[in-house]
Amino acid sequence: QVQLQESGPGLVKPSQTLSLTCTVSGGSISSGDFYWSWIRQYPGKGLEWIGYISHSGRTYYIPSLRSRVTISLDTSKNHFSLKLSSVTAADTAVYFCASGYSYGYGLCFESWGQGTLVTVSS
Amino acid sequence: IQMTQSPSSLSASVGDRVTITCRASQSVGSYLNWYQQKPGEAPKFLIYGASFLQSGVPSRFSGSGSGTDFTLTISSLQPEDFATYFCQQSYSTPYSFGQGTKLEIK
C-alpha cells in the first residue's frame, strides 16, 4: 500500500486560500490504479469527501465546493495538492488525503494520510 | 445519497458480539464500505463491496447487506476494536459517509 503525508499551513485567515500538499511514497502518483482524493473531517467528527484527481488529471469535485476547489497533480514531485479559496470558519476541519481505489464496487479509500488540522481564523 | 448509521454510540464489553447498522437514502447495491477510526488517527479501511474484508482485517469483522440496509458485525470484541466506525457509499458521486458509530467500553 502507498503511504501519504499531508503538509501545509495549520492556520488560514478568512477569505484567503487554503493550500495543502499530499506527498505519496511507496508508489507512483502516475499509476492508473488510484484516484487521489481529499477528505475532511469536521470537529463534530463527520467526514466529507471533497473530490479526486486521476493519474490523467481528470477531476471530480463535490457540488457544494465546486466553485472554490482545485485539486492538481505534480508527477515530478509525486504529490498532489488541494486549494480551497475564499475560506470561512465553516472550512475548519482536519484534512486528509487518501488513495481511492476500486475493487469493482466504486471507490474506497484504501490508504490515508495522518491528517492535518486547518483552522480558519483571523 | 444520505447515509445514516445506528446507533450513534454503543457500549459493549470485551467478548461481546456487536452489530452496527448503516442505511442509505436510496439503493446503493453492494457499493458500501466500512472504516474504523481511533482517536487522533486516520480512518482505517476495513470492508468493501458490503462484505469483502480488506487484506489483514481480522476475521471477527464481517459485513452484510445490499440495497439500502447494511450491517457491520464484530463477532467477539477485542480491546483494540473500541473505536468509531463509519460506512461510505461508493455507488455514485458525491461519495458520502455515515455520521459514525462510537463503540465504547462498558
Image (tube, helix red, strand yellow):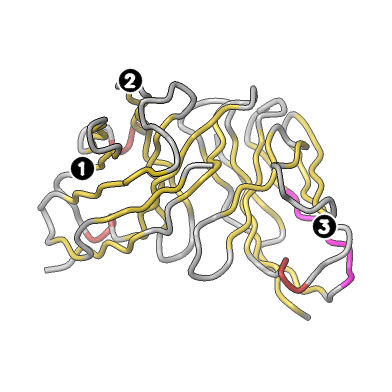
Q: Residue at x 55, y 45 (%)?
A: B97
Callouts 2 and 1 on one subunit: yes
> Of the numbered discs in the image, which one, if any, rests on residue B34?
none
Say left or right for A6 vs B36: left
Total number of numbered discs in the rendering: 3
Crowd around label 2: few <14 · some 14–19 · many ≥20 (10 Å):
few
For label 1, the SS is: strand
Please determine whether, in this image, residue A54 is positioned above or below residue B11: above
Chain under numbered label 2? A
Nearer to the camera, A28 or A57: A28
The residue that mark 2 highlights is: A58
Look at label 3 and name its amino acid.
Ile
Please determine whether, in this image, residue B67 is positioned above or below residue B18: above
Q: Residue at x 51, y 45 (%)?
A: A111
The residue that mark 3 highlights is: B74
Say left or right for A42 vs B96: left
Look at label 2 and name its amino acid.
Arg
Measured as percent of width and height from the top left, residue A106 is found at: 58, 26
Specify the quadrant of the image occupied by residue B70: top right
Measured as percent of width and height from the top left, residue A99 is found at: 46, 38
Measured as percent of width and height from the top left, residue A55 is found at: 36, 23
Mark 2–mark 1 contact, CB under 8 Å?
Answer: no
Measured as percent of width and height from the top left, residue B39 is found at: 54, 70
Callouts 2 and 3 on one subunit: no
For label 2, the SS is: loop
- Magenta highlight range: B15-21
Which quadrant, please, contains the N terminus of chain A?
A: top right
For label 3, the SS is: strand
Nearer to the camera, B105 or B96: B105
Specify the quadrant of the image occupied by residue B2: top right
